[in-house]
Image (cartoon, rainbow, N blue to C red):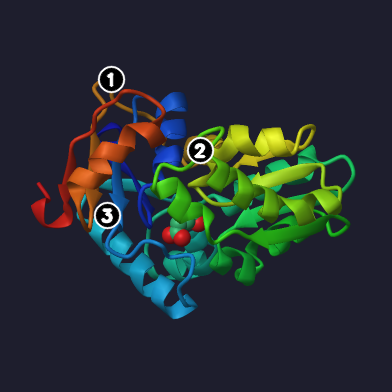
C-alpha cells in the first residue's frame, strides 16, 4: 500500500531539509524518512568516485525502510551519481537538477541563466547539460561557491552579517557582470540565503532547487501512481554523526519551530 510506504530523502547533511520542508508543505500526508550523511559532509569538494561511494551507502541505508521513491535532495549527489543510482537500484529516483533546470529555462527572458553550486556540481556541468537538453540557445554561467555551505552550516546566513555579505558579493559579481536575469540556487543549503541574494541581485529571478524539486516529485508520483499518504504521516530523521547537533539546527532549515527527533543510523527501528 502506498500510504504505508515512505519517501526516502537524502543529502550529505542538513541542506536536504529545505527539500523536506517543501515536500511537507505540498504533500503533508506523505511518510518521509530522511538521511543526512553528516559524517561525510561536505560532498561538494570530493572526487566523483568518493561521492558515488557515499551515495551508494546512503541508498543502502534508506532501503532498510519500506520505500516508494527516493529523492536525491543534494545537487552534488544528483549531478554526480544519479545515473549510477538509477542503474543500480530498482526504485524511482527524483532529483533537484532537472526540475531547477526546467524552471530556469521557462523563466529566463534574456536567455542568460546563472547557477551557483558546489565545486563538484559546477565541474560536472550537470546544469549546462540539463538546460542544454531543454533549449540549446540558452547560456548558462556557473559559479562554484565553496564557502557558502560551511557559512550556512555555521549559522552565518542572516542579514547584516558582514562575512556572508562580503562572500556573496564576491561570488555574485561575475554573474551580475554577465547580466543574467535568472539565478538557480543549485545547492540545497542556499535557500537560506534567498533574501540576501535577492538584495544583492534585485530584479533577478531566483529559483530554489528545493521548491521546484518538491513540485516535480509530486507530479512524478502522481504519474507513477505512487501518490497517496496517511493522515498521521510519519517523519523519521537519521544521521551518520552527531544527532544532537543536527537536531539543534533542523528547525532553521525546516523553516518552522518543528522539533525533530534525530537518530544515529545505528539506532534504526
Ligand atoms: N547540499 C549539497 C548540495 O545540494 C551541498 C553540501 C555539500 O557539499 O555536501 O549540493
In the foreground, 190 or 67: 190
Q: CA distance from mark 2 to mark 3?
A: 26 Å
Residue at horizontal 41 percent and vertical 62 percent from the top: 42
Q: Relative to 120, is 244 on the left or the right?
A: left
Q: Position of residue 202 (x, y in %)?
A: 76, 33
Q: CA distance from mark 3 to mark 1?
A: 22 Å
Q: Is mark 3 within 8 Å of ligand 1?
A: no
Q: CA distance from mark 2 to mark 1?
A: 29 Å
Judge whether 66 appears above or below 48 on screen.
Answer: above
Q: Earlier in the sequence, mark 2 or mark 1?
A: 2
Q: Which residue is mark 1?
A: 231
Q: Which residue is mark 3?
A: 62
Camera sees residue 152: yes
Q: Position of residue 213 (x, y in %)?
A: 54, 42
Secondary structure beneath label 1: loop
Q: Badge 1: how crowded within 10 Å, few (<14), some, or many (20+)?
A: few
Residue at horizontal 40 percent and vertical 29 percent from the top: 24
Q: Earlier in the sequence, mark 3 or mark 1?
A: 3
Q: Quadrant of residue 126?
A: bottom right
Task: Quadrant for the N terminus, please.
Answer: top left
Amino acid at each position: 500500500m502506498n500510504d504505508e510506504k515512505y519517501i526516502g530523502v537524502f543529502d550529505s547533511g542538513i541542506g536536504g531539509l529545505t527539500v523536506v520542508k517543501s515536500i511537507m508543505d505540498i504533500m503533508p500526508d506523505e511518510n518521509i524518512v530522511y538521511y543526512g550523511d553528516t559524517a561525510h559532509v561536505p560532498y561538494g569538494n570530493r572526487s566523483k568516485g568518493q561521492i558515488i561511494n557515499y551515495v551508494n551507502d546512503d541508498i543502502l541505508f534508506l532501503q532498510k525502510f519500506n520505500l516508494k521513491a527516493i529523492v536525491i535532495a543534494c545537487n552534488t549527489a544528483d549531478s554526480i551519481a544519479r545515473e549510477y543510482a538509477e542503474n543500480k537500484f530498482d526504485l524511482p529516483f527524483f532529483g533537484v537538477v532537472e526540475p531547477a533546470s526546467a524552471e530556469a529555462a521557462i523563466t529566463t527572458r534574456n536567455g542568460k541563466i546563472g547557477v551557483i553550486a558546489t565545486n563538484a556540481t559546477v565541474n560536472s556541468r550537470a546544469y549546462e547539460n540539463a538546460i542544454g537538453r531543454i533549449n540549446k540557445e540558452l547560456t548558462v554561467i556557473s559559479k562554484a561557491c565553496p564557502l557558502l555551505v560551511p557559512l550556512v552550516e555555521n549559522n552565518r546566513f542572516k542579514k547584516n552579517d558582514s562575512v556572508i555579505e562580503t562572500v556573496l558579493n564576491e561570488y555574485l559579481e561575475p554573474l551580475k557582470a554577465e547580466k543574467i536575469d535568472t539565478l538557480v540556487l543549485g545547492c540545497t543549503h542556499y535557500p537560506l540565503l534567498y533574501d540576501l541574494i535577492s538584495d544583492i541581485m534585485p530584479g533577478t529571478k531566483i529559483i530554489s532547487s528545493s521548491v521546484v524539486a518538491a513540485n516535480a516529485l509530486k507530479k512524478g508520483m502522481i504519474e507513477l501512481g505512487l501518490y497517496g499518504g496517511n493522515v498521521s504521516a510519519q517523519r523519521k530523521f537519521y544521521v551518520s554523526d552527531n544527532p544532537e547537533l543536527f537536531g539543534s539546527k533542523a528547525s532553521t532549515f525546516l523553516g518552522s519551530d518543528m522539533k525533530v527527533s534525530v537518530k544515529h543510523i545505528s539506532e534504526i527501528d
